[in-house]
Image (tube, rainbow, N blue to C red):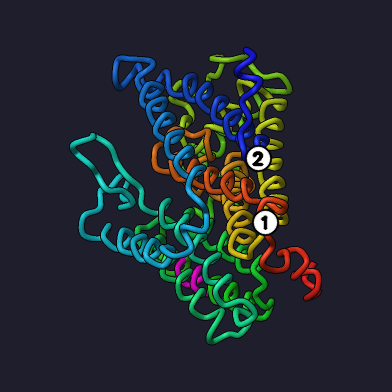
Amino acid sequence: MKSFRKLKLDCDQRVLLIVVFITVIGASIVASSSSYFSAAKFSDAYFLLKRHMVRILVAALFLVLALNIDYRFYRRFSPFALALGVCLLAGLFIYGYAIRDSVRWYHVKFFRMTLQPSEFARLALVVFLAYWINRKGKEFREFRSGFLPAAIAIVSVVALMAAQPNYGTAAATALIAVVVLFLGGARLLHLAGLVIAAGGAAAIKVWSEPYIQQRVAAFLNRGENLDAANWQVHQSLIALGSGGVFGAGFGGSRQKLSWLPDSHTDFIFSILGEEAGLIGTVLVSLLFLLLVLRALKISRQCGDTFGEVLAAGLGCSIFIYATLNMAVATGVLPVTGLPLPFVSYGGSALVVNAVSAGILLNVSKRRVGKTRRRGPRLGQRLAREGRI
């Protein structure tokens, strides 16, 4: 006990505790939500939980590794990481593994696992944008030499994601990129042009794809087709409503008994609400809010522009994913297929989010007072430009 008290982590311990707490909650909900499916398909109620625990250990190793690598190391290799992410996304059209008519994964037969390159590409894009904003400085506000190359990188990644098709991840990645560009000081006129162009491309895609039209129509008419297009959302709302304020207790979910598809992945938030009630959902929501607030504080205290944008971008990335997942589970947004960070069953998203948290923690190790400031803080620069 004394040795534990003497242990001091040279990083933002609140961020670390939040990540650990959310992951523990996630493991407990995965244990409950996957038990029926695991027993029915694998004759072992804890089959998916065991696999999830292994992935948590792998994610923890990556977090520790990222925590101990100077974040400035990524500045040099960020263009290569982005190029690798684009190549991996493009490679899906040749070597991709299809699940439910979507080619989003690589199947590694030796390890009996699948890898989703869109998660790595999302992280690589955030790091690259932070690198580009830092490299260009004031020139980033110029369209041709500063903003346009960043926009091309974003379009390349998002377009490849949408072509899989993986519209949910594409939309989330685009939103994250726009936030990073805003935090980096991009002109609002440039951002508006990018958003309008993206909206136009999305509208054309909706118009040309009957599948997307059905999704949009189902979202706009949630009271109809409860046995087909709106089945998941309908069952999700039943789960959240059944939980009440205090929930049905651990293992007390009924919707996991094959009523709610993807109850341990995309709709795990609904099972959380059913078993832990409103208190549980509010607690998890507040934890994600605290995480992004700590990330923004770390950003303000960082000693260089790259670290500022990187910390804010990584924190916002996790928060945006969590917000979109919760919005889908509560019927606020159409079904997108996004996991809840650190909670949903899965490997690729869990590891990438752990790496993001590790990089964020490493940035926190080099706050003001530990390194000499080499430029104005992000918040000060935005305030001076009249942006905040």
Kind of residue at badge 1: Cys
- Residue at the location (67% across, 80% down)? 189
Element carrying mark 2: loop
Instruction: Give x and y (percent) for residue 306.
Output: 58, 63
Q: Earlier in the sequence, mark 1 or mark 2?
A: 2
- Residue at the location (53% across, 63% down)? 174
| Magenta residues, dominant SS class | helix
Badge 2 is on which residue? 12
- Residue at the location (60% across, 79% down)? 140
Q: Is residue 202 magenta?
A: yes
Instruction: Name, please, the residue furthest toward the left.
Output: 110
Element carrying mark 1: loop
**Marks 1 and 2: CB-CB under 8 Å?**
no
Q: Where is 36 relative to 302, above or below?
A: above
- Residue at the location (69% across, 62% down)? 373
Magenta residues (range): 200-205
Badge 1 is on which residue? 302
> Crowding at label 1, few (<14), some or many (≥20) Cα neighbours within 10 Å?
many
Instruction: Give x and y (percent) for residue 380.
Output: 78, 66
Kind of residue at badge 2: Asp
The residue nearer to you, when weighing 41 against 30, is 30
The residue nearer to you, when weighing 94 against 383, is 383
> Crowding at label 2, few (<14), some or many (≥20) Cα neighbours within 10 Å?
some
Q: Is residue 29 magenta?
A: no
The residue nearer to you, when weighing 226 against 285, is 285
What is the count of numbered marks?
2
Specify the quadrant of the image occupied by residue 196: bottom right
Which quarter of the rendered picture does the N terminus lie within?
A: top right
Specify the quadrant of the image occupied by residue 351: top left
Which quarter of the rendered picture does the C terminus lie within?
A: bottom right
Specify the quadrant of the image occupied by residue 13: top right
